Image (cartoon, rainbow, N blue to C red):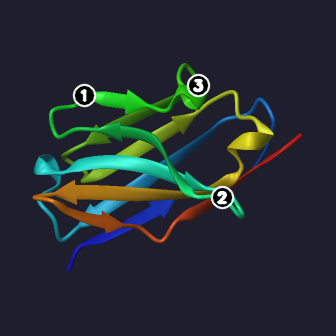
Amino acid sequence: QVQLVESGGGLVQAGGSLRLSCAASGIIFSYTGMGWYRQAPGKQRDLVATITSGGTTNYADSVKGRFTISRDNAKNTVYLQMNSLKPEDTAVYYCKGRLRGYDYWGQGTQVTVSS
């Protein structure tokens, strides 16, 4: 079955950096559009960044210039490099894969940014 496993979350001070990873299995990764979403307590889950199978990227306005999404098809992994982190970036970050109209989600990883 399809599995997406996130890692790399943690506690960081404002202005710091983290790199999230999402390892995929059970899916033809190179054909799969991937994305990162986040959900803060009491809020809806929002898009952070996406990357198509061809490598085209898209970002939420709130993270443009600070976050970078990338993928390594040889490792079946998508990354989210997060720089200049702010307290408002605190959330659970989820990895999503989309293939042939189906969405697959990871279990999430907590990112906490202290002021």
Q: Nearer the viewer, residue 55 or 46?
A: 46
Q: Which residue is found at the position 74% from the left and 33% from the top?
A: 16
Q: Which residue is mark 2?
A: 43
Residue located beneath label 3 in the image: 66
Nearest to N terminus: mark 2 or mark 1 = 2
Q: Identify the residue under disc 1.
A: 56
Q: Name which residue type carries label 3.
A: Arg
Mark 3 residue element: loop
The answer to whether the residues at label 2 and label 3 have Cβ atoms under 8 Å apart is no
Nearer the observer: mark 2 or 1; the answer is 2
- Which residue is depicted at the point 15% across and 59% down? 101
Please indicate whether residue 83 sits to the left or right of residue 90 in the image: left
Q: Position of residue 29 (x, y in %)?
A: 17, 54
Where residue 6 appears, as percent x and y from the top left, is 46, 61
Q: Is residue 88 left or right of residue 3?
A: right
Which numbered tag is attached to residue 41? none
Of 30 and 93, the residue lying toward us: 93
